[in-house]
Each structure stands twice: as C-alpha cells, then as structure tokens.
Amino acid sequence: MRPTVGTPASPVPAPVRLSELPPGRLARLHGADLTAHDCALLRAIGLTDRCLLRVCKIGEPCIVQVRATRIGLSRAVAHGIFVLPEGYA
C-alpha cells in the first residue's frame, strides 16, 4: 500500500538491543547475534520470529513476557537480541 500524497509516512523504527529497552516497552523480535544453538533454545521457549514481547525487567536476569509466559534471559543473551520497538505499555 502506498502512502497518500501529503501524508507523512510513519517512520520505521531501527532495531535496538533488547537490553536497551526500558521496562514496560513492547517490541517485536527482529533478529539475534547469537550462536545457532542459542537461537534454537530461544525459539524452543517461545521467542520466535516477529513475536511480540514486553520487557518486564532489565539487568541480570532480563525478564521478558511472551504471550502469557515470562522468560528470564542472561544479560549477555539480551544484549545479543535485536528488537523493533512497538510502542509504550
């Protein structure tokens, strides 16, 4: 779909590290700079391509909510995950 003439196009957010988002922020999984094994583990616990997640806590561990499940991630893993911010809670 093309934007209507005279209407500014909405800016597309740039991917950011999961570890940089504040608590309460919603985001979609964009990619990860992790080993293939770590990526497989993330998919197995529900962090799948383009899934919507909410940051519950930053730090060690970083806690995110995916659907109705809260998942604790190490700071190093959260630093390797890239997300697209969705909006504020």
Image (cartoon, rainbow, N blue to C red):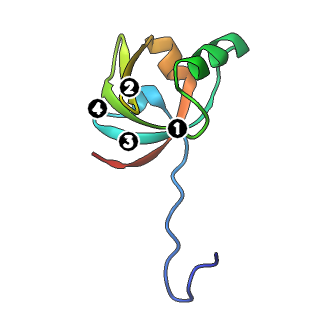
Residue identified by numbered label 2: 64
Residue identified by numbered label 4: 23
Name the residue type under label 3: Leu
Report how far apart the C-alphas of labels 2 and 3 lie in the structure. Answer: 10 Å
Q: Are marks 2 and 4 in contact (CB under 8 Å)?
A: no
Residue identified by numbered label 3: 26
Name the residue type under label 2: Val
Q: Are marks 2 and 3 in contact (CB under 8 Å)?
A: no
For the N terminus, the quadrant is bottom right
Q: Residues within 10 Å of mark 1 (few under 14, many from 20)?
A: some
Report how far apart the C-alphas of labels 4 and 3 lie in the structure. Answer: 9 Å
Element marked by disc 2: strand
Give the mark nearest the N terminus, 2 or 4.
4
Report how far apart the C-alphas of labels 2 and 4 lie in the structure. Answer: 9 Å
At 57% across and 19% down in the image, what residue appears? 42
Drawn side of residue 51 relative to residue 60, left or right: right
Q: Residues within 10 Å of mark 3 (few under 14, many from 20)?
A: many
Give the mark nearest the N terminus, 2 or 3.
3
Report how far apart the C-alphas of labels 3 and 1 lie in the structure. Answer: 10 Å
Residue identified by numbered label 1: 51
At 58% across and 79% down in the image, what residue appears? 3
Image coords of residue 51 (percent x, y)? 52, 38
Name the residue type under label 4: Pro
Image coords of residue 36 (percent x, y)? 72, 15
Residue 49, placed above or below residue 59: below
Q: In the displayed image of the protein, which residue is found farthest to the bottom? A: 5
Give the mark nearest the N terminus, 4 or 1.
4
Residue 31, placed above or below residue 34: below
Name the residue type under label 1: Cys
Q: Quadrant of residue 82?
A: top right
Element marked by disc 4: loop
Report how far apart the C-alphas of labels 2 and 1 lie in the structure. Answer: 12 Å
